[in-house]
């Protein structure tokens, strides 16, 4: 099962598009952002861009991914095929730590941003499905992906504003088995108590590029 299928499962259980609806709501973007030019690095099949369109976004929406879906360009975060100052907003959602050279990817993201534009980096927090992991005996980091991303932003000389989203999620035994299968894991769930009250957790870093 792919990441998109996992997100679809979580979205169904949550009753909202995960992670894009909570992400955009947390940012509380002003109305004028609907006409800004947006780049999604690591866009995959373009779900975020499609969701922006469904929310009424009228600006240019561009996606880039090494293994792109329809209407997404093929390319790599470390070598963005765009001129300097091409976009008002650049998204890097749950992808930075998967880059071969994350510092170069951040440098490239800053390069293609216009002065005053915003880089948005999203990572899953340490509470994400933490009760499910604990129930099946998996030890998770107390800082999750947040700490290494913070270190990368600091190493790149980027000052970020931090937002946090936590949402309750109730899982039945079938949901839990499906989620574990997306990580290529199996566990004996018969001894666990369901429904399981768990959490979805997203950390958002906002970096505004200084004006000219």
Image: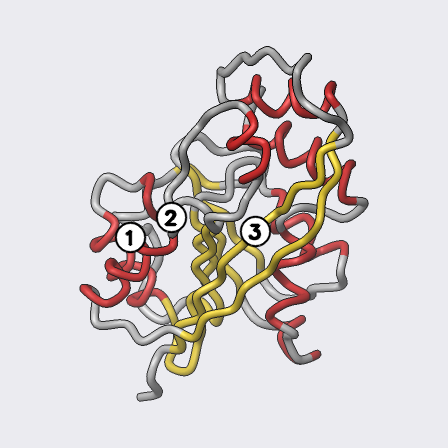
The quarter of the picture where residue 146 lies is bottom left
Image: 67 above or below 99: above
Point out residue 201 in the picture as x, y percentages from the top left corner.
56, 51
Q: Mark 1 or 3 closer to N-term?
A: 1
The quarter of the picture where residue 170 lies is top right
Say which residue appears at 77% left-offset and 37% top-offset: 13
Image: 76 above or below 196: below
> Residue most toward the right?
15
* Quadrant housing the C terminus: bottom left
Tag 2 near tag 1, CB within 8 Å: yes
Point out residue 156 in the picture as x, y percentages from the top left corner.
21, 65
Tag 1 near tag 3, CB within 8 Å: no
Q: Mark 2 or 3 closer to N-term?
A: 2
* Quadrant housing the N terminus: top right
Tell me the residue that label 3 is attached to: 201
Tag 2 near tag 3, CB within 8 Å: no
Tell me the residue that label 1 is attached to: 148
Left or right: 167 in relation to 182: right
Question: Which element carries disc 3, helix, strand or loop?
Answer: strand
198 vs 12, nearest the viewer: 198
Left or right: 104 in relation to 22: left
- Number of residues whose C-alpha sits closer than 10 Å to that of mark 3, classed few (under 14), some (14–19) or many (20 or more): many
Name the colour scheme: secondary structure
Say which residue appears at 31% left-offset and 67% top-offset: 110
Question: Which element carries disc 1, helix, strand or loop?
Answer: helix
Q: Determine the CA span between mark 2 and mark 1.
A: 6 Å
- Marks counted in the figure total 3
Left or right: 106 in relation to 131: left
Q: Determine the CA span between mark 2 and mark 3.
A: 11 Å
Point out residue 153 in the picture as x, y percentages from the top left corner.
28, 64
196 vs 56, nearest the viewer: 196
What is the number of the mark on residue 145? 2
């Amino acid at each position: 099962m792919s990441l998109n299928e996992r997100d679809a499962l979580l979205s169904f259980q949550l009753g909202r598009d995960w992670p894009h609806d909570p992400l955009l709501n947390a940012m509380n973007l002003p109305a004028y952002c609907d006409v800004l030019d947006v780049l999604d690095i690591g866009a995959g099949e373009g779900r975020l861009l499609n969701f922006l369109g469904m929310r009424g976004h009228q600006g240019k929406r561009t996606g880039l991914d090494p293994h792109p879906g329809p209407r997404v360009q093929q390319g790599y975060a470390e070598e963005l095929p765009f001129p300097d100052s091409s976009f008002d907003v650049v998204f890097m959602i749950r992808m930075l730590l998967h880059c071969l050279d994350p510092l170069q990817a951040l440098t490239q993201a800053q390069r293609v941003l216009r002065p005053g534009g915003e880089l948005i980096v999203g990572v899953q927090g340490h509470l994400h499905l933490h009760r499910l992991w604990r129930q099946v005996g998996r030890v998770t980091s107390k800082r999750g992906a947040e700490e290494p991303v913070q270190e990368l932003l600091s190493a790149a000389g980027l000052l970020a504003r931090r937002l946090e989203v936590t949402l309750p999620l109730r899982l039945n035994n079938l949901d839990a088995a499906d989620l574990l299968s997306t990580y290529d894991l199996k566990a004996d769930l018969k001894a666990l108590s369901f429904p399981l009250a768990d959490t979805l957790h997203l950390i958002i870093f906002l970096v505004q590029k200084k004006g000219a």
